[in-house]
Image (cartoon, coloured by chain):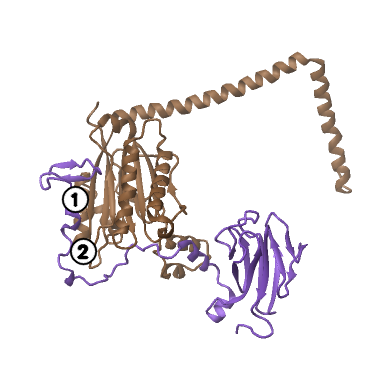
Chain colours: A brown, B purple
Amino acid sequence: MGVMPDAAPAEAGGRPETIAFFASVWSWITAHPLAAAGIVLAAAALVFLLLRFRRKRKGGAASSMNKENGERADVAIGNAHHIGARDSQQDAFVISDLSDRARCRKLGVLAVVADGMGGLSNGAEMSRLAARYFYRRFAACTEADDPASLLLQMTAGANDEICRRLGPDGLRKSGTTLVAVLVRGRELYWVSVGDSRICLIRGGAMIQINREHTYGSELDERAAMGELTPEQARDDPERKTVTSFLGMGRLEKIDRNIRPLRLLDGDRVLLMTDGVFNTLTDEEILSVLDVPAHESAAKLEALALSRALPGQDNLTAVVIECIKGVERV
Amino acid sequence: MEMKQCARNGHFYDASIHSECPYCTGAAAGGIAPADGATRPPTGGFDRTYPPAGPAIDRRGDERTRAPIVEKLGIDPVVGWLVCIDGPSRGRDYRIHADNNFIGTDRKNDICIPEDKTISHFNHAIISYDTKENAYYFAHSEGRAITRLNGKAILTTTRLNPYDELEIGQTKLLFVPFCGEQFKWE
């Protein structure tokens, strides 16, 4: 083809071809109506079968995985909880009842750590309220509840309860952070609001899996995008301000996973308040996590307290250890 | 060590030491903390878990890209007002700062009119004060409803005169300048 004189003729040239194609298809359909209907039906049936097959395969895999997990999966849990050098304990935590093994297999295990904030005893009340809400809701849940949406509902429900308790004038004056994990089989579901942490420990390394809702983490993101210099982000005096927490009214941010995180034997999940990770480095925390869960938690508490920091914050940690299931029900 | 789980909150504790859950009773919580307050300084080297004192969202608004006038003067002064004379927020006033002011129903806007559901969430319209020219401008931005100035639809940026009437959604705002021939922030 030579030089196109201009766009319009080329465009006009394309159109009759398309029209001609459809015209020929249409004339074929009108000539063979039964055959045409057959083709359409066959195509619809094929699509239907494909969708069905996909759904079945997906569901099948999930249930067999659960079954396999149900037979093997088992967790050991330890906790640490201390007032530090403060006047009141504003942290709270709960762990779902582990005594009913069959129920644990079916519904999983829930652990919640909350760090209350705000005036005097108010923070303490809010963190307890949130943790208790999760505990009660989980005790009443059934197998039909999807873990991810259950956690979300519990978070919303706890926030509602706290906001009701605070009343319209009390919003934002006090509140609580919250991290919760639900381990069902070998699947980890988690939710986080505020600046507490959930970490995964695997193969001697520790990574944080939630993002903290602090002004600092926003600054860091903006620094990463080049909007601020790293120094501006680092030196901002407001870094530690919590940007999302239960008790703020409508929740600004919720961090959670929708698809489960697959856990392996030997993995540990650590939930902790800032009283732990502000005192200890990741390396120090890791160094005590090589013994059974409850010993790990006790060592973690002892290590943090051994620093004897004059302003040691309330500290709370829950260690969940994935052990190879020995008991089989 | 004999680990036992308490029935109320599921706390694990050493039953060989405690007869009941020390976390629920508060026994462990207060256990090893310094007994006498005198040896403890009132504030430590640690920041408390920050109380959610200030509305964190608003603070972020303040931390936006800084306006030149803020860099120059160190303050973000008021340069005028909008006063709602008709609509759901009738009687309320809104501060105008230098440069661009975005108007919408969301709190992140510079001028937030949440009561009027016919105003778009973000950046429905813009009112600007140019520090160099000492002049005010008004423009429609991304809002759904037509924005009007003194009853006429505005489609381009228009210079404002004192007591012009701006109409955004169902809200009518009167423009009251602060800077002009008599005064200018310097």
Front-most of A181 and A154? A154
Pick out the residue farthest to the top: A34
Front-most of A292 and A101? A101
Q: Residue drawn 48% across and 61% down?
A: B57
Q: Position of residue A212 (x, y in %)?
A: 40, 56
Q: Chain of mark 2?
A: A
**Does residue B9 show up?**
yes
Pick out the residue farthest to the left: B16
Q: Residue drawn 19% across and 50% down?
A: B25
**Does residue A205 show up?**
no
Q: CA distance from mark 2 to mark 1?
A: 26 Å
Q: Residues within 10 Å of mark 1 (few under 14, many from 20)?
A: few
Mark number, residue B144: none
- Quadrant of the rendering where the C terminus of chain A is positioned: top left
Amino acid carrying mark 1 in the image: Thr
Quadrant of the image occupied by residue A117:
bottom left
Q: Residue drawn 43% across and 49% down?
A: A255
Is residue A5 placed above or below A312 in the rendered structure? above
Viewer-nearest of discs 2 and 1: 1
Label 2 residue SS: loop
Q: Position of residue A229 (x, y in %)?
A: 49, 68
Q: Which residue is mark 2?
A: A307
A39 relative position to B97: left or right: right
A171 relative position to A30: left or right: left
Q: Chain of mark 1?
A: B
Amino acid carrying mark 2 in the image: Arg
B107 relative position to A122: left or right: right
Front-most of A273 and A165? A165
Quadrant of the image occupied by residue B5:
top left
Q: Position of residue A139 (x, y in %)?
A: 31, 37
Q: Which residue is mark 1?
A: B25
Q: Position of residue B62 (x, y in %)?
A: 51, 68
